Amino acid sequence: MKKKKAKIRKKRNSIKKTRSHSSLLSLLIIIIVITVGFHFYKFIHHEIRSIVETPKTDTKKVPEEVKGKISPNYSEVYRVPILLYHYVEYVADKRDTIRQSLNINPNTFELQVKTLSDAGYIFITAKELGEVIGGQRELPKKPILLTFDDGHWDFDTVILPILKKYHAKATAYVVPGFLNGSDFLTDEQLRDVINSHLVDVGAHTVHHVYLKGKILPIVQYEVNQSKHMLENKFNIKVSSFAYPGGAFDQQVINVIKDAGFTTAVTTIPGVLQSEQNKYFLFRLRPGYRTGNELLNYLNQTQFKPY
Ligand SMILES: [Zn+2]
């Protein structure tokens, strides 16, 4: 009798062991699949190095699910134009229509900075605007932000000398996975930009990925990792984020908030910024306007962000 019971116990134990072995094995397989899949994902994005945003494809409206969370009675609203730039260069390849549509030539850019400076505008950074919204800093009388997306090489060779000439501060949204690529800043150039002490560096995902509707692990990776890569490599604090293509949803906002960013900028037109929209700040494309045309454009009131 005793022998029989012992035998049954032995059998049960061995079944338990096989079960735990097989569940361990499936867990291992799942981990391997996720790891390999993620590396494949990183490889694909790293190799493509593509930037496909254009003024036409940019997001122009606040998503409904985000809009629903805005309180209509919120009063502390700041009027702060945030200008959106990409390339500032003389585009050599006339067939490159995307580059041309996003470009402003260096002469025009300098005239714009001069116009704003002469008109008494004070150039602040995204980090400083975050501090204003957070109640830690006073807003200057006529504030404005110059922001540049993607971290192209011309930021160091063309834009920075103009910023230095006018002592104008700016914010550069960099894609760390693309640094040292043929069309982008090198590490050394970005160090030069940071050492000017005129430029706040923000994150723009690791691989310029449109985040709207993506699964959570990808959003978390692209947001958190872009911040860590820039902070660790360049010994800076990254506090602002720009959505590639202006594409975001509530899930993306939650990840941005959890990552510790104080602001995030969109491609939605508008000039009114507040605590309520600190994770979807509005921006304007100055285009080729200079002089009074630019000043009148900034003074208009019909931007309808919501
Ligand atoms: Zn971009």
Image (cartoon, rainbow, N blue to C red):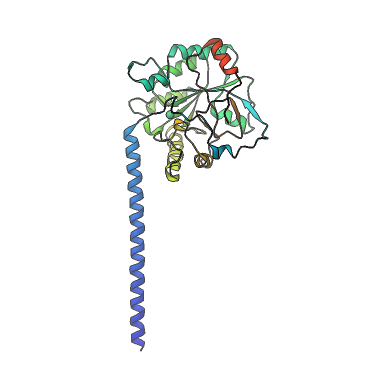
Locate the N terminus and report the quarter of the image it occupies. bottom left
Q: In the drawing, does residue 30 fall left or right of residue 126?
A: left
Q: Residue furthest bottom?
A: 1
Q: In the drawing, does residue 223 fall left or right of residue 305?
A: left
Q: In the rendering, at what x and y percent does residue 165 appear?
A: 49, 13
Please report the residue visible at 45 percent of the width from the left and 19 percent of the height from the top. Answer: 160
Q: Is residue 108 above or below residue 78?
A: above
Q: In the rendering, at what x and y percent does residue 241 appear?
A: 49, 33
Q: In the rendering, at what x and y percent does residue 88 appear?
A: 42, 18
Q: In the drawing, does residue 147 fall left or right of residue 99?
A: right
Location of residue 157 (image quadrant)? top left
Q: In the drawing, does residue 148 fall left or right of residue 123?
A: left
Q: In the rendering, at what x and y percent does residue 55 appear?
A: 45, 24
Q: Judge by depth and name the residue closer to the eye, 268 or 159.
A: 268
Q: Judge by depth and name the residue closer to the eye, 193 or 304.
A: 304
- Residue 11 in sight here: yes
Locate the C terminus and report the quarter of the image it occupies. top right
Number of marks: 0
- Residue 116 in sight here: no
**Ligand 1 appears in which quadrant?**
top left
Location of residue 277 (image quadrant)? top right
Q: Is residue 2 above or below residue 119?
A: below
